[in-house]
Image: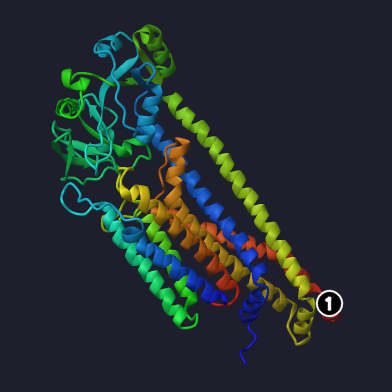
């Protein structure tokens, strides 16, 4: 397997895992917020699912095209990892996303640790990918 | 066939030894990351310390004996706490010489009453005598704080006009404080009467001493007359009142402790940056020397085809520039992510105030770190490149 296909495959798997994490693998809190709407973690879950799915689809497209566009897919994956880490942590405010303050909640016990690990793995893989694809001239 | 341009050849040379090029990019990446993140951390801690010195306002703080570590946590981290002084503390402090102004404060800690709430520190201030909060608000609120309303720190959710819910009471937000880098950012300020009313409402959830006696005081902030030494006033208070469970600490001690910790952390950051720079310089110089040595015959052929010494130098320089620029961009980007995600948590763990610089300053720091990393990479490759350019054509072609 050449380098482009390897990183596209890694991005596809990690992107898919990120997309599934908040609602399937480690679901966020189901209860409604005191004001009746969704809690912050639900909005984080939507954001993470959308971003993870977009990264996975871009990588799949790249694989189908025989590795063309791999550099862009890896760059998008790195950006996706940053968004999935920084926005729910409250570093940037996007659409009310965040994690619940109560550490006993499902989102803090299950979803957040899993998302941080997956985003970290995706970010690290794509950082290495960005360097290797550059030095091998595949950009 | 594509023309043999300098950058075209440089690109091919980079791809020819991918793992060596990977190590070169990684060395520059590491240096630019440590330089940017370290500089931002150092600057943010300095700004936090300066903010602490400017914002504290009080020369001496009087707290119950044994609770001086708590006041540190309250001021630095905004960690909710509740403690109370004897009820006649103000009368007793009037007997101490050198005090210009006294301002009592009452601390009330909220609890996690519902799934989406989190504990906050509420401070009841005597707005008439206050000299801590009022100076901060002089530009944003041109009237006194009234009963039944609150002022929030910058990290508390709620804009001016919104209402916050405490113990079953909704209180409108009258103003927001600018960021201080200290625990005040996560606090809420009300009048002492409002604090007493909240404590009465809190009786529905837990017993609170403030609900029985609304005049309870948690701490007294003292401003001294000009020329009066805060250390001697604090010592006088401790001498007269320590047996009654009262303790005075002078805020300079607090600020000096922050300054000492900051000096140690700053030295560690500078040392790390210097070590990583040295590592990067050595790795880049060594790898470029190896690379140039391996390609002596290739360079000899290029010279024989008409390439000047300058062209050979430019070729190695172009490789170094491409590698350094790419590594520096990635390193600064990684540094920006680490700065946003991890540095505030690191500062909280070190128990130091943290006040991040403005966006414009961060952008300038990023550009400066990028420039420094690129210059380091190109300069480190200069010596082996110059040596290759100076060699004789026939000797080079023979690989000597």
In the rendered image, residue B330, in percent from the top left (x then y), is placed at: 52, 63
**In the visual, does A64 lie left or right of B201?**
right
Quarter of the view holding residue B304: bottom right
Dot 1, how many residues are within 10 Å of its Cα: few (below 14), some (14-19), or many (20+)?
some
Quarter of the view holding residue A24: bottom left
Residue in the foreground of this view, choosing between B120 and B87: B120
Residue B138 shows in this picture: no
In the rendered image, residue B21, in percent from the top left (x then y), is placed at: 64, 69
In the rendered image, residue B107, in percent from the top left (x then y), is placed at: 27, 26
Which residue is rendered at x = 75% and y = 87% of the image?
B305
In the rendered structure, the residue with mark 1 lies on which chain? B
Considering every residue shown, the one lying at the far front of the view is A25
Q: Quadrant of the N terminus of chain B?
A: bottom right
Considering every residue shown, the one lying at the far bottom of the view is B1
Which residue is rendered at x = 54% and y = 57% of the image?
B369
Residue in the foreground of this view, choosing between A120 and B391: A120
Q: Quadrant of the C terminus of chain B?
A: bottom right
Q: How many marks?
A: 1
In the rendered image, residue B223, in percent from the top left (x then y), is placed at: 33, 22
Q: Secondary structure at mark 1?
A: loop
Which residue is rendered at x = 48% and y = 37% of the image?
B350
Residue B40 shows in this picture: yes
**In the visual, does A16 lie left or right of B132?**
right
Scheme by which the image is coloured: rainbow
Q: Which residue is mark 1?
A: B399
Quarter of the view holding residue A54: bottom left
């Amino acid at each position: 397997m050449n380098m482009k296909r390897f990183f596209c495959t890694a991005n596809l798997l990690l992107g898919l895992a990120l997309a599934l994490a908040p609602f399937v693998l480690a679901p966020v809190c189901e209860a409604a917020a005191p004001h009746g709407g969704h809690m912050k973690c639900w909005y984080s879950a939507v954001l993470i699912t959308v971003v993870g799915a977009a990264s996975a689809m871009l990588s799949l497209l790249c694989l189908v095209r025989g590795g063309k566009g791999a550099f862009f897919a890896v760059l998008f994956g790195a950006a996706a990892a940053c968004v999935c880490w920084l926005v729910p942590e409250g570093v940037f405010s996007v659409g009310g996303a965040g994690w619940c303050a109560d550490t006993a909640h499902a989102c803090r016990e299950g979803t957040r640790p899993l998302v941080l690990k997956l985003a970290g793995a995706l970010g690290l893989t794509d950082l290495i990918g960005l360097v290797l694809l550059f030095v091998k001239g595949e950009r | 066939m594509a023309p043999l341009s300098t950058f075209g050849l440089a690109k091919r040379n980079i791809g020819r030894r991918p793992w060596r090029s990977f190590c070169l990019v990684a060395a520059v990446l590491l240096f630019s990351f440590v330089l940017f993140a370290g500089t931002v951390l150092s600057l943010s801690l300095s700004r936090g310390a300066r903010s602490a010195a400017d914002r504290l306002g009080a020369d001496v703080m009087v707290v119950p004996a044994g609770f001086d570590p708590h006041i540190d946590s309250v001021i630095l981290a905004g960690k909710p706490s509740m403690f109370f002084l004897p009820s006649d503390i103000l009368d007793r402090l009037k007997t101490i010489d050198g005090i210009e102004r006294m301002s009592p404060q009452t601390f009330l800690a909220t609890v996690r009453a519902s799934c989406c709430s989190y504990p906050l520190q509420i401070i009841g201030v005597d707005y008439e005598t206050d000299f801590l909060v009022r100076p901060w608000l002089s530009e944003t609120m041109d009237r006194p704080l009234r009963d039944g309303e609150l002022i929030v720190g910058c990290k508390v959710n709620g804009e001016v006009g919104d209402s916050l819910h405490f113990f079953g009471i909704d209180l409108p937000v009258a103003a927001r404080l600018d960021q201080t880098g200290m625990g005040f950012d996560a606090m809420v300020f009300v009048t002492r009467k409002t604090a007493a009313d909240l404590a009465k409402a809190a009786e529905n959830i837990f017993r609170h001493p403030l609900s029985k006696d609304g005049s309870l005081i948690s701490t007294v902030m003292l401003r001294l007359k000009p020329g009066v030494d805060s250390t001697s006033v604090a010592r006088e208070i401790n001498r007269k009142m320590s047996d009654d469970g009262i303790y005075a600490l002078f805020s300079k001690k607090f600020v000096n402790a922050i300054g000492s910790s900051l000096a140690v952390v700053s030295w560690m950051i500078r040392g790390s940056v210097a070590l990583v720079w040295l590592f990067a310089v050595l790795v880049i110089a060594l790898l470029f020397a190896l690379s140039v040595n391996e390609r002596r015959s290739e360079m000899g052929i290029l010279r024989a085809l008409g390439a000047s010494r300058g062209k050979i130098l430019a070729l190695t320089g172009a490789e170094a520039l491409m590698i350094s620029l790419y590594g520096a961009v990635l390193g600064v980007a990684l540094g920006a992510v680490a700065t946003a995600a991890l540095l505030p948590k690191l500062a909280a763990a070190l128990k130091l105030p943290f006040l991040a610089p403005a966006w414009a300053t961060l952008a300038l720091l990023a550009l400066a770190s990028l420039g420094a990393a690129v210059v380091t990479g190109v300069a480190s490759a200069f010596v082996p490149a110059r040596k290759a350019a100076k060699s004789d054509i026939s000797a080079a072609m023979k690989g000597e």
